[in-house]
Amino acid sequence: MPGTPSRLLAVASSVVAAVVAVVALAGLAACGGPDRAAPAAAPADLVLVGGDVITMDAARPRARAVAIRDGRVIAVGDDAEVRALAGAATRVVDLAGLTVTPGLVDAHCHLVGLGASLERVSLRGVASEADAVAAVAAAAAGRPAGEWVLGRGWDQNLWDGAFPTRATLDAALPDHPVALRRVDGHAVWVNSAALALAGVTAATPDPAGGRILRDATGAPTGVLVDNAMDLVEGKIPAASADVIERRIRAAASYAVERGLTGVHDMGLDDATLDVYRRLAAAGALPLRVNAYVAGDPAVAATLRTRAIEPGTAESHFQVRGVKIYADGALGSRGAALHADYSDEPGQRGNWVTSPAELRQAIRDAVDGGWQVAVHAIGDAAIHEVLAGYADALAAHAGADLRLRVEHAQIVDLADVPRFAALGVLASMQPTHATSDMPWAEARVGPDRIRGGYAWRTMLDAGVVVVGGSDFPVEEVSPLLGLYAAVTRQDHDGNPPGGWYPGERMTLDEAIHAFTAAAAYAGFAEAERGALRAGMVADVTVLDRAIDAAAPGPSLRDAGVAMTIVGGRVVFEAP
């Protein structure tokens, strides 16, 4: 593979590139140069040779081999120099050309939500409302009457575009309350039994930041959007600590099998944080979790006096950020827009948190020393978040805040330079673009879509783009994110040439988003996100070589051969 660094690493204005370069120079000074192994007092524990190592180290972007001892990288170089660090007890793995990256990190996901989804009815990819009802009815067969039936994954855009109704659920499941979240998590489809338990009728007003879809008589149709979901979901029994632990364990295992060495788990309550702390203390987390507190305005107000939990370089758990919602999602027309939706005049989305409350929540959290990550999908929401961030930055001049906009899907192009000027991170999910591309332009029209899922526009402006998936909204595998980033195509290669292909990333830029940029977003760039001597040994080994010149075909079908966290192999394919 070519040895040229990624375009992003070469952009002098990139904050992450500057940090990586400084740390690289310090590492080189310590070990004598990019091609020299650090003096070893003992043999390596693990040596990987014969690979195509994409290092994310600006001083040496490509190498052949990596040596690991005591959880740290002790050398990155050619096969001969790294083999020299092996002893009698060293495990030596000949990769035969497989691609190696720093440990891949999903910087926006819901690990606990994945665990819950693995236990619930999956409606992902279901092609019709009738098929969805049939799947739910089959899952409910044999359950006691009155037991909740929960599921997730439906998407009316795969049907005829019309939202489903309670009537079809009522006919098949009259004796169970049913709650089925939309694929994006921003709408729930329920039956009449669930509405009755919640006391939702035609007389129930829309809550602030939410919407009850209604028929011509004003009666609820069975779909509740954004804050209206709480009306029903608040009646679902809360999971116990044992259930939360079971879900975390299952989801973490699922994630490392797909190459993830770390996640940024967004929007957690105190009960879940307590379970995470217990698992981390017991050494029972196979990957690193950077947790973000669920931050509605009331919670954000408490953050002025609540201490962060920053962890250490080797920690598998830290809590130093808060996740706040500005608006809803594009698929359910809840994203807050400056102008009407192109396919629903009169509708401009939902402010899940009002602009005034949003600014106050940002200020409360920043004043308390917390990193803030705000979910903002529509152009109006993004604009308001940037304004709130500008205020917070002005009040904390010189502070290293690393404020984040989560999703940043429909950006007013005039706001792109503000991201760069403020140093705000764009936390974006490449597979959202390839999932949404069949209908996204219909939502916002041909002009606004030019700022849609605009990774290249962001990168060229010097904005740090951080990669994730938002799973279980999307599939877990970060390789699907890399594929979407470099092709802007679905798994079948459509559309030819890619959807708005000018916004594609290079392979190195895409890997950077899921490694070095993710580490920077978690205040961990001095220890993780690159492969060079002295760094924590988080490594992902793919099951094939990826062609940098044409990475799409090989990424599309790639899997994971090995996942290494802190020098320990936590997953290895047969």
Image: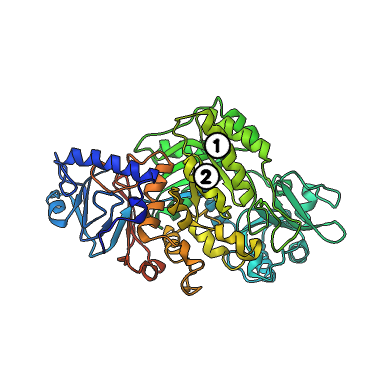
Quarter of the figure with residue 237: top right
Question: What's the residue at 47%, 61% (across, down)?
Answer: 503
Rounded to the nearest angstrom, the CA distance separating label 1 from label 2 is 9 Å
Query: Which residue is disc 2 drawn over?
Result: 418
Is residue 394 positioned above or below 258 on the image? above
Amino acid under label 2? Arg
Question: Which one is nearer the viewer's eye here, 542 or 341?
Answer: 341
**Is residue 386 found left or right of 216 in the rendered image?**
left
Quick check: can you spot residue 184? yes
Residue lying farthest top? 305
Query: Which residue is disc 1 drawn over?
Result: 390
Residue 429 image point, x, y percent: 50, 55
Question: Which one is nearer the viewer's eye here, 296 or 234?
Answer: 296
- Circle 1: element type: helix
Determine contact: label 1, label 2, CB under 8 Å.
yes
Amino acid under label 1? Ala
Residue 435 image point, x, y percent: 55, 64
Question: What's the residue at 68%, 40% (across, down)?
Answer: 354
Question: What's the residue at 38%, 38% (across, down)?
Answer: 315
Is residue 439 positioned above or below 285 on the image? below
**Is residue 148 found left or right of 552 in the rendered image?**
right
Label 1: how many Cα within 10 Å (few below 14, some 14–19, many 20+): some
Q: How many circles with numbers are drawn on the protein?
A: 2
Nearest to N terminus: mark 1 or mark 2 = 1
**Is residue 475 found left or right of 37 in the rendered image?**
right
| The C terminus sits in image quarter | bottom left
Quick check: can you spot residue 286? no
Residue 99 image point, x, y percent: 29, 61
| The N terminus sits in image quarter | bottom left
- Circle 2: element type: helix
Quarter of the figure with residue 391: top right
Question: What's the residue at 49%, 49% (across, down)?
Answer: 427
